[in-house]
Image (spheres, rainbow, N blue to C red):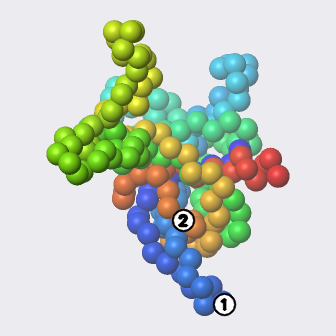
Amino acid sequence: MRGILARKLGMTQLFTERGTVVPVTVLEAGPCTVVQRKTVASDGYDAVQIGFGEVTTRRATKPQAGHFKRAGLRPMRTLVELRDAGEPSVGDKLTVSLFEAGQRVDVVGVSKCKGFSGQHKRHNFGRGPVTHGSHNIRQPGSIGSVDAARTFRGMKMAGQLGNARITARGLEVVRVDAERNLLLVKGSVPGARNGVVLVRDSDKEASL
């Protein structure tokens, strides 16, 4: 499975030849460096570890610094493993040339954190009546049986919203700019601006 790490720069729009507007997310994809190759003989499975975003040595822990030193590379901020990614060698560069316009990709990222949110915002609950002196406007309502004398697990209640790993599947690559290492993907992708996401071959495309 081909994949590359990218930084989300923001959203813009493109005009097609027909004059229709296409909303796109601009991703600064790579170049990513192959840091490690894992094999069945040594690790029990085949995978490729890629890194993105070089940092200074003092920004890395001692185990991380030793890991990169063995590979003969400078420390990197983000590491990701890819299964079935072919047989690239340690030190090889992965660029946006892996993808082409019209291809379907999956984008994996961490969604924005909304903090502690109520049931209406977190679970899309409806509100209660706002007339006749009702005080039950944004309350959850009944949350279970009276006889149980306890709250059952799994109830949709208030809590942290966002800050979760999200996969946007089957997004279309609208344009590939190899000179500036940019991928323009149709629609929105998870995460905040300047967040790091993983762009990989789509599972949907493989199932068609």
Badge 1 amino acid: Arg
Q: Position of residue 18 (x, y in %)?
A: 66, 90
Q: Residue at x 63, y 38 (%)?
A: 82
Q: Position of residue 108 (x, y in %)?
A: 53, 46
Rendering quarter of residue 155: top left
Quadrant for the N terminus in the image? top right
Q: Residue furthest top?
A: 148
Q: Nearer the viewer, residue 180 or 151?
A: 151
Q: Secondary structure at mark 1?
A: loop
> For residue 187, which numbered disc appears in the image?
2
Q: Is residue 147 visible?
A: yes
Rendering quarter of residue 137: top left
- Left/right placement of residue 30 relative to residue 142 reads right
Q: Residue furthest front?
A: 132
Q: Is residue 117 visible?
A: no
**Is residue 35 shown above or below 32?**
above
Rendering quarter of residue 15: bottom right
Q: Which residue is mark 1?
A: 18
Q: Are marks 1 and 2 in contact (CB under 8 Å)?
A: no
Q: Residue at x 41, y 51 (%)?
A: 191
Q: Nearer the viewer, residue 207 or 194?
A: 207
